[in-house]
């Protein structure tokens, strides 16, 4: 099993550009989530999904869109990149049901100029 | 609101013990603990659920005081491999199961020979 994979590993954008961060998992997990990690801030939840076709907002959703058309994939779209979105982005997945561990992907380091 | 972790950083010699605390102002359903090494993804350590159930590794222990909304992670006989940043994630006791984790800012643990 590949676990949780994320692409790209690194990305540099200019302000105003849009892009999609890809996340895929091969563990048949119902629950998937996106976090951003900034120095000294910990992990902050952006969006999450409890199954295909179901998404909801987390703590910091503004400027990001998600969709979940399949169990495996959960892409994160930046609509119009801003320097404040410079961060490391982690995707995670886990089994639904009584609280279970989340498996994190390797992360995408995004810089917005 | 982010849970508050203490201490922010701690340095240990191999073999020493450490306690990391996590405190929330909200009623909690679960507390999750993760460890992140520099440049890597967070890795699951333990989940503590309201009512006393625990899921996690045998060699790591933790407690959850539901009345005080506090959790502590106990690291005994520390090894060099314990070094990293420890995060607690809390899930509010909203009754319906939110699946939303709010992480603290982390505790940086350094173990030296």
Image: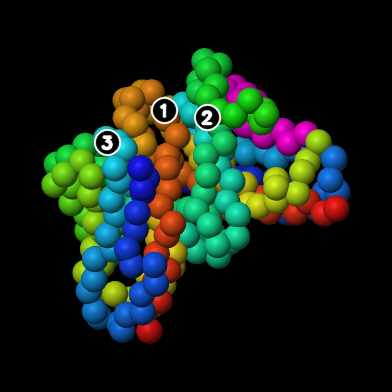
- Give neighbour class at mark 3: few <14, some 14-19, many 20+ (Cα, 10 Å): few
Mark 1 belongs to chain: A
Query: From mark 1 to mark 2, how far is it between C-alphas?
Result: 8 Å
Q: Can you give x and y, in whole percent of width and height, for residue A65 in the image? A: 22, 58
Query: From mark 1 to mark 3, how far is it between C-alphas?
Result: 16 Å
Mark 2 belongs to chain: B
Label ID, residue B47: 2
Element marked by disc 1 = loop
Q: Tell me: residue A28, above or below residue B103.
A: above
Element marked by disc 2 = strand
Q: Dividing the image into 4 quarters, which one contains the N terminus of chain A?
A: top left
Give the side of residue A65 with respect to residue B89, left or right: left
Query: From mark 3 to mark 2, how far is it between C-alphas?
Result: 21 Å
Question: Residue placed at 34% from the left, 31% from the top?
Answer: A95
| Residue topped by disc 3 | A28
- Give neighbour class at mark 1: few <14, some 14-19, many 20+ (Cα, 10 Å): some
Judging depth in this view, the residue of B69 and B7 nearest the camera is B7
Label ID, residue A99: 1
């Amino acid at each position: 099993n590949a676990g949780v994979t994320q692409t790209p590993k690194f990305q540099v954008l200019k302000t105003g550009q849009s892009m999609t961060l890809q996340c895929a998992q091969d563990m048949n997990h119902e629950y998937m989530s996106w976090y951003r990690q900034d120095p000294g801030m910990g992990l902050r939840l952006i969006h999450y999904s409890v199954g295909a076709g179901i998404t909801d907002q987390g703590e910091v959703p503004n400027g990001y869109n998600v969709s979940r058309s399949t169990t495996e994939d959960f892409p994160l779209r930046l609509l119009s990149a801003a320097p404040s979105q410079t961060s490391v982005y982690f995707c995670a997945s886990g089994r639904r049901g009584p609280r279970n561990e989340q498996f994190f992907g390797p992360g995408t380091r995004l810089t917005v100029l | 609101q982010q849970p508050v972790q203490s201490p922010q950083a701690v340095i240990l010699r191999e073999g020493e013990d450490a306690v990391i605390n996590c405190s929330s102002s909200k009623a909690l359903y679960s507390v999750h603990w993760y460890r992140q090494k520099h440049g890597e993804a967070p890795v699951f350590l333990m989940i503590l659920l309201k009512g006393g159930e625990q899921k996690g590794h045998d060699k790591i222990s933790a407690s959850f005081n539901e009345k005080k909304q506090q959790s502590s992670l106990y690291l005994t006989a520390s090894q060099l491999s314990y070094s990293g940043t420890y995060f607690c994630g809390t899930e509010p006791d909203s009754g319906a199961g939110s699946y939303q984790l709010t992480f603290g800012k982390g505790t940086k643990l350094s173990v030296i020979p």
